Image: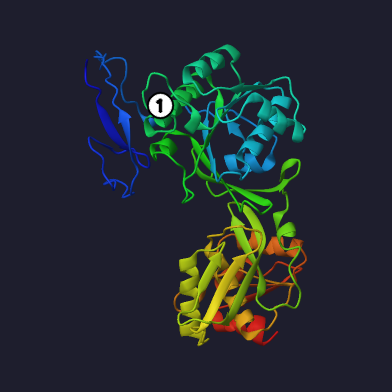
């Protein structure tokens, strides 16, 4: 009897080795190797026809506009770049319980009700379980088909028979190919299943959504090759016990990766928020120190958010710094700038920063808002609730220009704000806007004097 040959594969990056290793030399992850049976593949010899393929000039290539169809969910269409491209492969990631399956069953219903044929493939739930969720969400359609199966060969045969316009696969880690000896969810199975769905999508022109699990660090599980194979990667984020959900495009071959979709989880499913600024700042407290409205832009969407800070004397030798919704290292840098350039003694104070609503923002224009909220809490002076701020802070304490300043000011004006503090380098482009007082500043001291000390 022939000896079965095995190999060890890193479940994070796909690195292969003949023996088990504690630490992967490729991605530096510990205890990520699992044993898999090595498949012997017979290599076919191809005779290359020199006349069949040749390089062509870029000017002679004819371009065509991608054919898209709407999901009937505006927030998702925004993130995808205007709708789903026919024949595209889209990877959806997110924490367990965040609402991925809920969103995709709603997408399936909307697309099916528009006259298209949809196949929802589930390897995690039975057909009756999906039916129960659909009934709770009020979903009914004659062109929405449910298929509970994880055998890749059976799935492919049913796709060829049904020939749907849209496929939902929940999730890719549960699908397996019987020709491979490894277990479902391993690197080899995930690569094989994704490759098969990619061929089906491109060959038959079927748009496909595949759900991917995430690791405890929040990144998509499986090899990075998975993200390279698909056309679009969108990430579903938000606090599990918070009602707001965000969708971002991490990769998009057919659109921008800067767009943001905002949803609210309710009893009847996910409801899109057309004006998230109004909702997110509606509960801002009045006459309370440590709170200010910041003007941020995600993609092409301006958003007003409430930035909160709490500064209090530390009970320990080393002061505590906590950041929720913003980058921790950015907060540490801004506190150092505040001490060095303004002279605010907070080295013996605990500082807590939070963006209300469970939303994460990495845009540098929120720097001025973080500083103002910290100073307001430290001095126990409330900031006028009709004032908003936007500006990036440099290490020398200067307030630097930000992008899309007109959109930020227009959003503030629309929601009834009377004053906005902006960098002076942005002032020339917007000084003629009426209906809101625009105050330019050069540095942190000026901003603090205008907003807090000389209101």
Residue 170 or residue 441, whichever sits in front? 170
Q: Is residue 114 visible?
A: no
337 versus 247 height, above or below: below
Q: Position of residue 193 (x, y in %)?
A: 44, 26
Circle 1: is it few (<14), some (14-19), or many (20+) Cα within 10 Å?
Answer: some
Residue 447 or residue 335, whichever sits in front? 335
Q: Which residue is mark 1?
A: 192
195 versus 350 height, above or below: above
Residue 428 or residue 309, whichever sits in front? 309
Q: Position of residue 63 (x, y in %)?
A: 49, 29
Q: In which quarter of the view is residue 449 placed?
A: bottom right
Quadrant of the drawing holding the C terminus: bottom right
The colouring scheme, among rainbow, by chain, secondary structure or one colour, is rainbow
296 versus 117 height, above or below: below
Q: Residue at x 55, y 28 (%)?
A: 123
Q: Position of residue 79 (x, y in %)?
A: 59, 43
Q: Residue at x 58, y 83 (%)?
A: 446
Quadrant of the drawing holding the N terminus: top left
Q: Is residue 200 visible?
A: yes
Residue 200 or residue 353, whichever sits in front? 353
Please count the marks in the image: 1
Q: In which quarter of the view is residue 226 placed?
A: top left
Q: Residue at x 74, y 73 (%)?
A: 385
**In the displayed structure image, the side of residue 300 where residue 287 appears, left or right:** right
Tag 1, which secondary structure?
helix
Q: Residue furthest front?
A: 1
């Amino acid at each position: 009897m022939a000896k079965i040959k095995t190999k060890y594969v890193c479940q994070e990056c796909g690195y292969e080795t003949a023996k088990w290793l504690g630490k992967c030399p490729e991605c530096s992850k510990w205890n990520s190797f699992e044993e898999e049976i090595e498949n012997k593949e017979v290599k076919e010899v191809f005779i290359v026809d020199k006349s069949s393929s040749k390089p062509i000039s870029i000017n002679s290539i004819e371009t065509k506009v991608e054919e898209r169809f709407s999901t009937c969910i505006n927030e998702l269409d925004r993130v995808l770049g205007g709708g789903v491209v026919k024949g595209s492969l889209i990877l959806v990631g997110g924490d367990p319980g965040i609402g991925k399956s809920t969103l995709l069953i709603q997408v399936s219903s909307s697309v099916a009700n528009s006259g298209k044929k949809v196949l929802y493939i589930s390897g995690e739930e039975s057909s009756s379980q999906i039916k129960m969720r659909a009934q709770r969400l009020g979903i009914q359609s004659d062109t929405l088909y449910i298929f509970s199966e994880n055998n890749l060969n059976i799935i492919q045969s049913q796709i060829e028979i049904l020939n749907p316009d849209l496929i939902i696969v929940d999730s890719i880690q549960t699908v397996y190919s019987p020709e491979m000896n490894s277990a479902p969810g391993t690197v080899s199975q995930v690569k094989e299943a994704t490759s098969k769905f990619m061929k089906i999508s491109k060959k038959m022109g079927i748009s496909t959504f595949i759900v991917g699990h995430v690791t405890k660090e929040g990144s998509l599980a499986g090899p990075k090759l998975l993200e390279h194979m698909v056309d679009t990667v969108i990430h579903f984020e938000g606090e599990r016990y918070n009602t707001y959900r965000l969708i971002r495009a991490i990769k998009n071959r057919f659109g921008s990766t800067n767009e943001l979709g905002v949803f609210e989880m309710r009893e009847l499913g996910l409801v899109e928020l057309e004006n998230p600024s109004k909702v997110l700042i509606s509960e801002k407290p009045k006459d309370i120190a440590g709170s200010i409205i910041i003007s941020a832009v995600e993609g092409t969407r301006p958003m007003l958010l409430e930035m909160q800070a709490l500064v209090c004397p530390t009970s320990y030798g080393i002061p505590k710094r906590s950041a929720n919704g913003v980058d921790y290292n950015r907060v540490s840098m801004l506190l150092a700038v505040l001490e060095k350039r303004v002279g605010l003694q907070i080295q013996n104070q605990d500082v807590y920063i939070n963006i209300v609503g469970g939303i994460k923002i990495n845009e540098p224009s929120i720097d001025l808002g973080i500083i103002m909220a910290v100073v307001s809490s430290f001095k126990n002076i409330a900031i006028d609730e009709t004032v908003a701020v936007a500006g990036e802070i440099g290490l020398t304490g200067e307030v630097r220009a930000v992008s899309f300043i007109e959109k930020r000011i227009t959003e503030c004006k629309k929601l009834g704000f009377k004053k906005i503090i902006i960098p002076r380098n942005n002032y020339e482009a917007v000084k003629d806007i009426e209906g809101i007082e625009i105050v330019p500043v050069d540095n942190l001291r000026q901003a603090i004097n205008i907003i807090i000390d000389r209101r």
